[in-house]
Amino acid sequence: MVSIGDLSSKTGVKIETIRYFERIGLMPIAERKSSGHRVYDETSLRRLTFIGRCRELGFSQADIRSLLGVEDNTPSCDEILSITTHHRTSIKAKISDLRKLERRLSEISSTCLSNDTPVCPIIESLSEIY
Amino acid sequence: MVSIGDLSSKTGVKIETIRYFERIGLMPIAERKSSGHRVYDETSLRRLTFIGRCRELGFSQADIRSLLGVEDNTPSCDEILSITTHHRTSIKAKISDLRKLERRLSEISSTCLSNDTPVCPIIESLSEIY
DNA sequence: ATAACACCTGTAGTTACTAAAGGTTCAAGG
DNA sequence: CCTTGAACCTTTAGTAACTACAGGTGTTAT
């Protein structure tokens, strides 16, 4: 039985965030001491650890909800693998988008290095109307 | 002299977003017809085109503000190159972060494929307390 | 004239938290 | 026992960067 501060330091999730997770239903409603202070047990610790790791891995709250079986039932191993795979796919897509961006930016910047025009070629190329 | 709808279809920026840009000062306060409808000229078109392209390239509003010289003066070519380079650096960092994530997810998923345990190894590995 | 459409304002919702204001409770030292 | 400072409580507002809606006015074509 630990306090919210202890839970926070054990998981690395900020106190406000833990209360927020309770509010939105990611964490169950915590039991209280007579004073009103929240108390947590090992189950809470495991659950928050799980949420924290998912967060580090970039899962959305909706994904975490599904993984935890918050609104439906506990998901099957297949469902979990499917959510994870889907998340991986979207990460790969994001990487590919960012790489394209980087290439475009690098092209645009290169015109700037050979700069002998009175007007900035980056600005020009970005405001040009076709 | 065109309407907000025309400007929107020429630039691909939604009408609500154009009004929003005016509200936050990215676009200048538009002139109005006697009816109250906004009217735009070529200068607005160039400016919105610029903003739209920057947005596609993932620049933050703060960056766009600097590039446009909204709060300070018109930036020098050096300043523009510096903002762009900085943005490229953060894109590269994001790519590298996402790649790490992807590798972690791929590791975690692989344990699931050889699944003969009664409990999901993905969930297990994510909620484990050390 | 009237329908259909474009435009107007103002406000609230999105995601995933974070921070601040203003008030209890707890634990340790004197 | 009393005090003081840390930790806790609630509620509300703020962040980025828009998007969407409600409820009203203007414009255009038949």
Image (spheres, coloured by chain):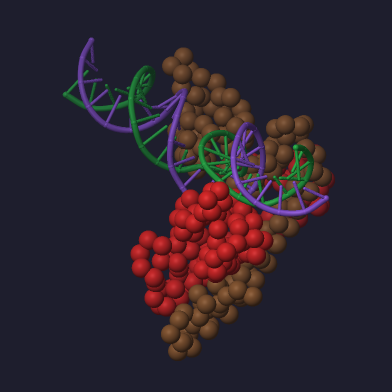
Chain colours: A brown, B red, C green, D purple
Point out residue A49 in the picture as x, y percentages from the top left corner: 58, 40
- Residue in view at x 46 percent, y 87 percent: A117
Q: Can residue B101 be seen in this view?
A: no
Q: Is residue A102 visible?
A: yes
Q: Relative to B64, say whether B108 is above or below.
A: above
Point out residue B130 in the picture as x, y percentages from the top left corner: 57, 43
**Dividing the picture into quarters, in which one does residue B82 lie?**
bottom left
**Dividing the picture into quarters, in which one does residue A30 lie?**
top right
Task: Please give left or right for residue B43 compared with residue C2 in the image.
Answer: left
Q: Which of B64 and A95 is in front in this view?
A: B64
Q: Relative to A118, say whether B30 is above or below.
A: above
Point out residue B68 in the picture as x, y percentages from the top left corner: 45, 67
- Residue in view at x 46 percent, y 55 percent: B29
Q: Which of B72 and A103 is in front in this view?
A: B72
- Residue in view at x 39 percent, y 72 percent: B75
Q: Relative to B82, say whether C1 is above or below.
A: above
Point out residue C28 in the picture as x, y percentages from the top left corner: 29, 27
Task: Please give left or right for residue B110 compared with residue A95 in the image.
Answer: right
Q: Which of A130 and A26 is in front in this view?
A: A130
Looking at the rendering, in which quadrant would you find the C terminus of chain A?
Answer: bottom right
Q: Nearer the viewer, residue A31 or C17?
A: C17
Q: How many marks?
A: 0
- Residue in view at x 54 percent, y 54 percent: B33
